Structures are given as C-alpha cells and as structure tokens.
Amino acid sequence: MYSWDPKLENRKSLFMEHMYKCSARTNGLFTGLWQDFCLKEAGPYCQNMYFEQLEAIKEYEKHLAEQREREIKQEEDFKFGIEQLVLGMDLEAEATGLNPEKEWFDPALHD
C-alpha cells in the first residue's frame, strides 16, 4: 500500500499555493502551474546556475594550473640552487687544490 506522508503532502500544497500566487492568476485554476513555474522561475534560475557552475569550474581549473606552474617553478629553482651549490663546491675544491672526486691516499696510514 502507498504510504502517506502528511508533511510531504503539506509541502506540495504550500508550494502549489506559492506557484499560484507567483503566476498572478486570479481564476482559481492550478492547471499548468508547474510548466509556468519551470519556464518563468526555475528555468532561468537553473540556466544562470548552470553558467555560474561552468565559470566556477573554469576558475578552479585556472587556479590549479597556476598552482602547478608555481610548484614547477619552485622545483626548477630548487634544482638550480642545488646545481649552483655543487658548482660552488667544485670551484672551491679547485681553488684549494682539493679534488673531492679523488681519494686522498697516505701510504703511512695504509693497513
């Protein structure tokens, strides 16, 4: 058997009254109210909401792309900094005559 929900039925009734008042009808006819509501109220609202959502998605994707660009730039800057640090260490080793790639050997300390 169909379950009756008084709260839901009351909400339907109240909304029908709202649609009737918004339609500016005075003839007491409720026929076609839903179609009028969809075309005049809900339709334009949903259409605007659709384009607002598209714009929000576009802005979000733009934000993600900008964030990714910043991350890539930070990674590149970090790599460049490391390369400069290593290059600086190599230049310092050349200037002092020490070469970190060659192992220093002292025969007196040999096993």
Image (cartoon, rainbow, N blue to C red):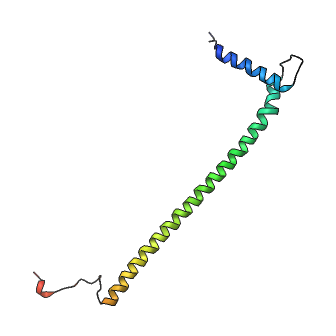
Q: How many marks?
A: 0
| Residue visible at 27% across and 84% down in the picture | 102
Which quadrant of the figure has residue 41?
Answer: top right
| Residue 62: percent from left, percent from top | 63, 56
Considering every residue shown, the one lying at the far top of the view is 1
Where is the N terminus found, in terms of image quarters? top right
Name the residue rendered at 69%, 19% in the picture.
Answer: 11
Q: Is residue 10 left or right of residue 76?
A: right
Estimate the x, y position of residue 10 in percent, counting from the top left. 69, 16
Relative image position of residue 29 (x, y in whole percent)? 86, 17
- Residue 17 drawn at (x, y percent): 78, 20
Q: Is 48 on the left-hand or right-hand side of 68?
A: right
Q: In the image, is residue 17 above or below residue 1? A: below
73 above or below 55? below
Q: Quadrant of residue 34?
A: top right
Q: Is residue 9 above or below residue 85?
A: above
Q: Give residue 22's quadrant in the image.
A: top right
The structure residue drawn at horizontal position 37% and vertical position 86%, both measured from the top left corner, is 91
Q: Residue at x 69, y 49 (%)?
A: 55
Quadrant (top left/top right/bottom left/bottom right) for the C terminus: bottom left
> Seen from this angle, which residue lies furthest left?
111
